[in-house]
Image (cartoon, grey):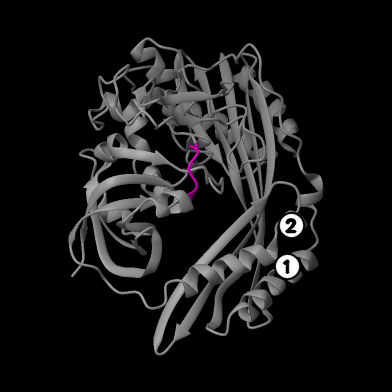
């Protein structure tokens, strides 16, 4: 059975059993990936996953059930399972089915050609990327990981109150991670890029060359003396730090007392050069979406505007509790997960400075390009962080050498306040991104 046939049969049988309202949440994902090593195919994998969750109101109570299979004999199981747990589940607040938004943004075109890419194109792209990386610099001794992949994802939410939301997306990604060696020293570096339209649109040579540059530029690294230094978080490190603290903008975290931003709406919580936006309707980004996990139409939201906190991430439940309108940030970790709160395409709005400008205006300081140990070294409740990192030492406006064996410490909420310059190098490669950010000083522990 296809999903439409399954949904219709499920709802028909559900009405016969006495269900007043019903809803399905269906997810189907497929990925095809080629990994090469030393000029040969190392792995070729095809992975399919997904499933369907069902919820329905029977005898005045909401019941839940889920399945990975779409077969006729599963329909009875779903309905019986949901009816059984409706009798025993107790909830302080009854979940509600949503009839849908008044209107929805137009869905981006689904790239059928990308989804139908033949394996030979993936294989040749991966081999070319490896060849290019190995030939780019004699110090590159190995492409440790070199892969090209295609991911497809389909989501369908339908209920008996009129909601019917459907999307299909596909994404091609190229990634290479290389090892460089010189005079007994070994370092690594990687780079990746993506396309929503075709594998051929990815500049494979550029990905390879940038991975090589990331690796060889780390050769000769050594530590620096412990002190407070001006710090530039390069765009990728800035995105890492932001991603580690996104939960502080969640209305769920605020309501549970897990965020220091509670009660700060309308107040200045960041430097005036910081504007934080979640825009799921932006074109040609990996994390776009026209509806959230509850079927609410998405829109562009300014979380922080010129340093002022404007809103939290809200789903319909948190919005009702706060007496505001949902920001369409309902999320699900999987098809059978609980409704939560999360962002879609979150980013710090770019400034006007180039990264080169920031470096040129730094007399003595540090540019951080990679943060390590984010799970263990960050505390979202307090905002404190202490993270091992890699970067480059700057003197008299020029990058002098690579730096390692250092730790950067600070507080995320203080960092927001202390940003004095925002770069123009915003690069969308995931769901949370940032341009480079410059701060007057942070604590660095080295030698």
Secondary structure mostly seen in the magenta stretch: loop
Circle 1 — which element?
helix
Q: In the rendered view of the protein, which quadrant contains the N terminus?
A: top right
Q: Is residue 179 left or right of residue 375?
A: right
In three-dimensional space, the C-alpha distance between marks 1 and 2, rounded to whole angstroms, equals 8 Å
Front residue of this view, candidates 115 and 77: 115
**Which quadrant holds residue 313?**
top left
Q: Is residue 353 magenta?
A: yes
Q: Is residue 68 magenta?
A: no
- Looking at the image, which residue is at 46% across and 84% down? 181
Residue 323 makes an appearance in the image: yes
Residue 243, above or below 9: below
Circle 2 — which element?
helix
Q: Position of residue 224 (x, y in %)?
A: 24, 68
Residue marked by disc 2: 199
The crowd level at tag 1 (other Cα within 10 Å; few <14, some 14-19, many 20+) is many
Q: Position of residue 122 (x, y in %)?
A: 73, 65
Residue marked by disc 1: 125
Extent of the magenta region: 350-355
Residue at the far front: name it: 396
Residue 444, above or below 278: below
Q: Position of residue 15 (x, y in %)?
A: 63, 17
Front residue of this view, candidates 150 and 216: 216
Residue 42 makes an appearance in the image: no
């Amino acid at each position: 059975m296809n999903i439409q046939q399954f949904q219709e049969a499920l709802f028909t049988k559900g009405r016969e059993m006495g269900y007043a309202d019903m809803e399905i949440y269906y997810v189907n994902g497929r990925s095809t990936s080629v990994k090469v090593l030393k000029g040969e195919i190392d792995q070729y994998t095809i992975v399919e996953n997904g499933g369907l969750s069902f919820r329905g109101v029977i005898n005045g109570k909401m019941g839940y059930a889920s399945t990975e299979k779409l077969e006729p004999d599963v329909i009875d199981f779903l309905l019986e399972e949901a009816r059984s747990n409706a009798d025993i589940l107790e909830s302080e607040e009854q979940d509600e089915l949503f009839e849908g938004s008044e209107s929805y943004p137009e869905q981006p075109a689904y790239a059928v050609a990308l989804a139908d890419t033949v394996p030979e194109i993936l294989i040749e792209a991966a081999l070319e990327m490896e060849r290019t990386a190995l030939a780019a610099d004699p110090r590159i001794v190995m492409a440790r990981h070199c892969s090209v992949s295609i991911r497809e994802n389909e989501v369908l939410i339908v209920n008996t109150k009129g909601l019917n939301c459907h999307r299909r997306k596909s994404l091609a990604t190229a990634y290479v991670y290389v090892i460089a060696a010189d005079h007994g020293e070994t370092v690594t570096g990687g780079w990746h890029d993506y396309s929503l339209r075709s594998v051929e649109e990815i500049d494979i040579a550029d990905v390879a060359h940038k991975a090589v540059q990331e690796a060889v530029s780390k050769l000769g690294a050594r530590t620096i003396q412990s002190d407070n230094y001006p710090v530039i978080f390069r765009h990728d490190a800035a995105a890492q730090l932001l991603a580690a603290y996104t939960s502080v903008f969640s209305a769920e975290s605020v309501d549970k007392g897990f965020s220091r931003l509670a009660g700060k709406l309308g107040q200045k919580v960041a430097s005036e050069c910081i504007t934080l936006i979640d825009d799921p309707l932006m074109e040609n980004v990996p994390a776009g979406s026209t509806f959230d996990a509850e079927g609410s139409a998405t829109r562009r939201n300014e979380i922080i505007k010129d340093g002022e906190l404007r809103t939290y991430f809200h789903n319909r439940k948190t919005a009702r509790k706060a007496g505001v309108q949902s920001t369409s940030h309902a999320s699900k970790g999987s098809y059978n997960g609980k409704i939560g709160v999360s962002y879609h395409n979150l980013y710090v709005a770019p400034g006007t400075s180039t990264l080169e400008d920031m470096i040129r205006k730094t007399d003595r300081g540090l540019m951080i390009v990679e943060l390590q140990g984010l799970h263990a070294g960050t505390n979202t409740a307090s905002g404190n962080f202490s993270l091992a990192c890699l970067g480059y030492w700057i003197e008299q406006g020029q990058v002098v050498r690579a730096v390692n064996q250092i730790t950067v410490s600070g507080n995320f909420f203080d960092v927001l306040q202390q940003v004095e310059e925002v770069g123009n190098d915003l690069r969308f490669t995931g769901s949370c991104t940032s341009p480079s950010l410059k701060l007057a000083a942070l604590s660095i522990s080295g030698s």
